[in-house]
Structure formats: structure tokens, C-alpha cells
Image (cartoon, rainbow, N blue to C red):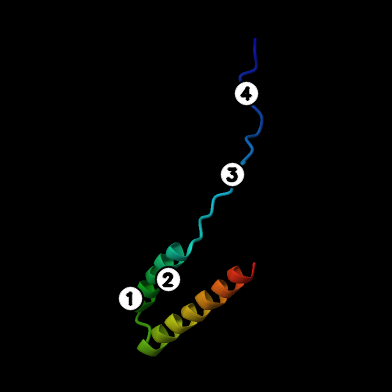
Amino acid sequence: MADKRTGKRVKTVRTLRKSANNLDTLFQTFKSIKRAEGRATGTLTQYEDNYGYFIEYSNILTATI
């Protein structure tokens, strides 16, 4: 009787899940949720500003790598 089980499968290709488009989509979802919670307009604007700073910072980091 042959053993039909195989060993642990090894992942040989790295997949990139977090792209800028994905982050933009997630941020839009986050902002919609916060708007539905009734956050103040100034708070939502601050979220957008901070997200913009984060994207600029991450672009600088990826450009230097």
C-alpha cells in the first residue's frame, strides 16, 4: 500500500497584496465608515491629510530602496 500523502507544500513565489491601489480602496472604506459614525468634518479632513503624508513617506522609502 503506497502512502498517498505528500509533504508540506512550500511557497516558491512571493505575492504582493498591499499595493497603492489596495491602500486607497481600504482608506476610502475607512473614511466611509468614519463618516457613517458621525465624525466631524475636521476629523475626516485630518484623516485625509495624514493618509496623504503616509503615502508620500512610503513613496520616499520605496524610492530609496
- Mark 2 lies on residue: 27
Q: Please report the residue visible at 34 percent of the width from the left and 78 percent of the height from the top.
A: 35
Q: CA distance from mark 2 to mark 3?
A: 28 Å
Cα–Cα gap, marks 4 and 1: 50 Å
Between 36 and 19, the one nearer to me in the picture:
19
Disc 4 vs disc 1: which is toward the camera?
A: 4
Q: Is residue 22 above or below residue 4?
A: below
Q: Position of residue 38 (x, y in %)?
A: 34, 81
Q: Which residue is mark 3?
A: 13
Earlier along the polypeptide chain: callout 1 or callout 3? 3
Q: Is disc 2 in contact with disc 3, using a CB cutoff of under 8 Å? A: no
> For residue 4, what is the image quadrant?
top right
**Looking at this view, is 10 or 41 the one in front?**
10
**Dot 1 corresponds to which residue?**
36
Q: Kindly identify the amino acid type of the residue bearing the numbered disc 2.
A: Phe
Front residue (pair 44, 49) = 49
Crowd around label 4: few <14 · some 14–19 · many ≥20 (10 Å): few
Residue projecting furthest to the top: 1
| Mark 1 or 3, closer to the camera | 3
- What is the distance, in whole Å, between disc 1 and disc 2 at their CAs? 14 Å
Left or right of 52, for residue 32: left
Q: Secondary structure at mark 1?
A: helix
The answer to whether 6 appears left or right of 17 in the picture is right
Task: Give the residue furthest to the bottom.
Answer: 42
